[in-house]
Image (cartoon, rainbow, N blue to C red):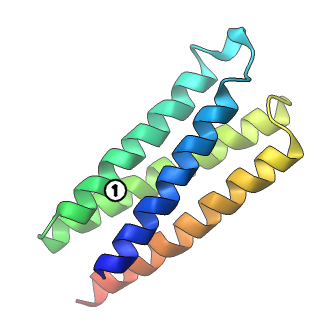
Amino acid sequence: MKENNLLIYQKYLELVYYINDLVRKYPKSEKFALVQEIKQSLYTGLRHLMYAIKSFNKNDKLKHLNEFDICMNLLKIHLRLSYRYRYISTQNYTTSSEYIADICNMLGGWINSCLKK
């Protein structure tokens, strides 16, 4: 399972880099609103992912994985809003959605493996 954890971590870091580059292009009026929410979801998600990777207790690991899942869902909503208000292009939305879908698939598998133990 260690390799899988590392893969999801690497993929999530790629998403963080990508999203950080995207939000630099947002209008100034959104810098303290939507951009702040996006970054908060990103970094809170990263924190929960790291806690889940380091956790040895199954219940703690599941708690952090579920919190990470919530952060991913919030990020989806924020990006959908960004696309709707045309802060990001169709290509940016598609690319970020693909990152998120891959991460969510890995996360779902990880949660299922924890539940089976």
Q: Nearer the viewer, residue 3 or 40?
A: 3
Residue at point 29% right, 57% down?
Answer: 64
Instruction: Report whether 9 appears left or right of 54.
Output: right
Counting other residues with Cα less than 10 Å from the Cα at mark 1, is it few (<14), some (14-19), or many (20 or more)?
Answer: many
Residue at point 61% right, 58% down?
Answer: 100
Residue 55 sits in quarter = bottom left
Residue 87 sits in quarter = top right
Q: Is residue 71 above or below residue 30?
A: below
**Residue 95 image offset from top left, x and y in percent:** 74, 54
Residue at point 29% right, 90% down?
Answer: 116
Label 1 sits on residue = 49
Q: Is residue 43 above or below residue 34?
A: below
Q: Nearer the viewer, residue 100 or 74?
A: 100
**Residue 1 image offset from top left, x and y in percent:** 31, 82
Residue 18 sits in quarter = top right
Q: Secondary structure at mark 1?
A: helix
* View extreme (top): residue: 29
Instruction: Report whether 16 appears left or right of 111.
Output: right
